[in-house]
Image (tube, rainbow, N blue to C red):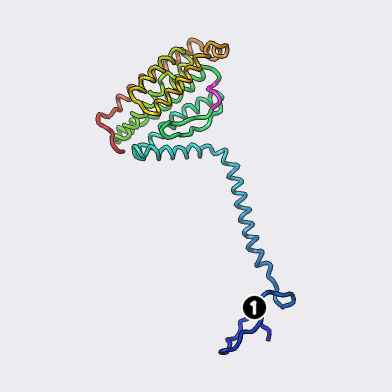
Amino acid sequence: METRDHTIAAPLAPNEPAPLASQPGPIHPGSGRRIDWRRIFAPLAALGAILAKAAGSLKAILLLLPKLKLLTTAGTMLVSIGAYSLIWGWRFAAGFVLLILVHEMGHVIQLRREGVKASAPMFIPFLGAVIGARSFGGNALAEARVGLAGPVLGSLGAAALVPIAIASDSDMFRALAFTGFFLNLFNLLPVVPLDGGRAMAALSPWMWILGFAALAAVTVLFPNPIMLLILLLGGLETWRRWQTRKSPEGQAYYRVAPHARILVAAVYLGLIGLLAFGMSATHLPRTFGDV
């Protein structure tokens, strides 16, 4: 009697050979066995559907990535927090990076107010952060506003930590506030590429020389590779600007109305005074240890 694949054969007697129909072997036409193509192609069709869905999702991600500039900011922030954590611990490192973010967002906001497209900040461990922009607004006064916007917002961010430090009696928040005041004050040194040098674009080019001398003095007192790099960049930029200050383009760029010069000077000097006071008020008499 012929048996098919879907039937259950009766148990074989001892030493009885198995029927030939049950032996594995090639399938020949006319053998009575049919190929179930659905079983073969159903898994392939399912796999194709999965791949098509994955390809669609990948395409959507690739189209969306250029718009997710925040991911670049967040990713480099995490890298910087990890780097600074090796020195100060993760809590202080996180607060420090957030203070830098607030400072840099001041530049971004003002650049966009000046009609200049600016990227979100990208953080570089131990060097701060950078912003991509094609210009600083087209003239010295706009550059001064962009330069001062960072320390203004950064100082407000550091000042916001003072009541938290007082309410919680936390040395960590006092140290963060002090650090924020110091960073913004340092950035007001009147030499490019620091923010104070941007402000000096609307005042007097002679201040760049004084600022560069002050930066050189700070580098001698506190020698480290970062200060040397800032000094080198500052020297090159100061020399370039000094050389071009009397060209027709330079004279047009640095032409600023007297009342605007007075306003920039007032903001600049006022910031220096307030930041110095903030540092004095948040200075810890003992060494701030591991946070």
Residue 209 percent coordinates (x, y):
43, 14
- In the rendered image, residue 122, in percent from the top left (x then y), is placed at 48, 34
Looking at the image, which is closer to me, 12 or 231?
Answer: 231
Q: In this view, does 224 lie above or below 84?
A: above
Q: Is residue 199 left or right of residue 24?
A: left
Res. 148 visible in picture = no
Secondary structure under badge 1?
loop
Pick the residue in front: 149 or 76: 76
* In the image, residue 203 lies in the stretch drawn in magenta: no
Residue type at mark 1 is Asp
Q: Main secondary structure of the magenta part?
A: loop
What residue do we see at 59% from left, 49% from top?
57
Q: Is residue 71 above or below residue 227?
A: below
To which quarter of the image does residue 93 belong? top left
Residue beneath the point at 66% across and 66% down: 40
Q: Residue furthest right?
A: 30
Q: Which residue lies furthest to the left in this view?
A: 286
- The C terminus sits in image quarter: top left
Position of the N terminus, as image quadrant, is bottom right
Q: Give the range drawn in magenta.
A: 133-137
Tag 1 residue: 5
Q: Nearer the viewer, residue 262 or 204?
A: 204
Please indicate whether residue 197 sits to the left or right of residue 217 in the image. right
